């Protein structure tokens, strides 16, 4: 097996650092925008919310594992708040799409915040409700953190390594 197909290592947060796990369609685009935020220290593409341990991309694509494609973010809350991350999350995908994201259709491409603590849950709900009040039919799920499994190395830093920009994620002002 080449290193490209090996699973990436998920960095542990250091002293004073926190974790966010966000799913907004194809993890390549989600990671692309999140890793550009000052205060984001590390991102890892992977899978969460499913019922299979250590799934591979191929298994997740069968739509039978229950996993979401997601990004594990280690960040410094003294430089960027969870609310700022969540706003970028909502504003770089279509949180109203229920069956996937853009041309990527399937349960693995659903929109969700996997909150790590009560503060993240509350912030996510406030932002979701704010968008609902603005007339958006928000499909984003707010779910408790689940086991996060890293994706294969070739999924990590995809656009930095391959060039280009996300095909189904585009920034737009919602708030």
Image: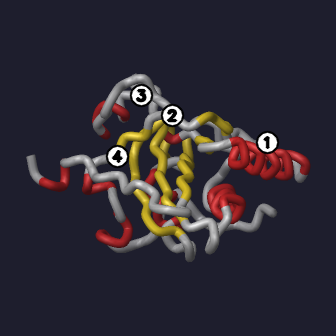
Camera-side mark, 4 or 1: 4
At 78% from the left and 62% from the top, the residue drawn is: 174
Q: Residue furthest right?
A: 133
Camera-side mark, 2 or 1: 2
State the image coordinates of residue 107 (x, y, percent, origin top left): 51, 32
At 19% from the left and 48% from the top, the residue drawn is: 6
Which of the marked residues, 3 or 4, is nearer the chain's N terminus? 3
- Using the image, tell me which numbered label, if any, was put on residue 137: 1
Which of the marked residues, 3 or 1, is nearer the chain's N terminus? 3
Q: Marks 4 and 1, Cα distance to the nearest angstrom?
A: 31 Å
Q: Nearer the viewer, residue 57 or 39?
A: 39
- Using the image, tell me which numbered label, if any, was put on residue 146: 2
Q: Marks 4 and 2, Cα distance to the nearest angstrom?
A: 13 Å
**Residue that label 3 marks:** 63
Q: Measured along the vertical axis of the image, is residue 99 above or below residue 86? A: above
Q: Nearer the viewer, residue 106 or 71?
A: 71
State the image coordinates of residue 92 (x, y, percent, origin top left): 62, 61
Which of the marked residues, 2 or 3, is nearer the chain's N terminus? 3
Which of the marked residues, 4 or 1, is nearer the chain's N terminus? 1
What element does badge 4 sit on? strand
Labels 3 & 1 near each other (Cβ < 8 A): no
**Residue that label 4 marks:** 150
What element does badge 1 sit on? loop
Q: Residue furthest left?
A: 1
Q: Marks 3 and 1, Cα distance to the nearest angstrom?
A: 24 Å
Q: Marks 2 and 1, Cα distance to the nearest angstrom?
A: 25 Å
Camera-side mark, 3 or 4: 4
Q: Nearer the viewer, residue 171 or 86?
A: 86
């Amino acid at each position: 097996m080449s290193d490209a197909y090996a699973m990436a290592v998920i960095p542990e947060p250091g002293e004073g650092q926190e974790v966010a796990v966000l799913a907004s369609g194809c993890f390549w685009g989600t990671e692309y925008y999140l890793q550009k935020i000052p205060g984001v220290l590390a991102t890892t593409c992977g899978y969460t919310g499913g019922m299979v341990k250590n799934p591979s991309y191929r298994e997740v694509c069968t739509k039978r594992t229950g996993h979401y494609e997601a990004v594990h973010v280690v960040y410094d809350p003294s430089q960027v708040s969870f609310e700022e991350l969540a706003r970028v999350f909502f504003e770089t995908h279509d949180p109203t799409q229920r069956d996937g994201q853009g041309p990527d259709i399937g349960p693995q491409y659903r929109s969700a915040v996997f909150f790590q603590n009560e503060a993240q849950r509350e912030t996510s709900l406030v932002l979701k409700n704010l968008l609902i009040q603005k007339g958006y039919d928000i499909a984003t799920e707010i779910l408790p953190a689940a086991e996060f499994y890293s994706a294969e190395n070739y999924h990590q830093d995809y656009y930095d390594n391959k060039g280009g920009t996300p095909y189904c994620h585009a920034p737009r002002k919602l708030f």
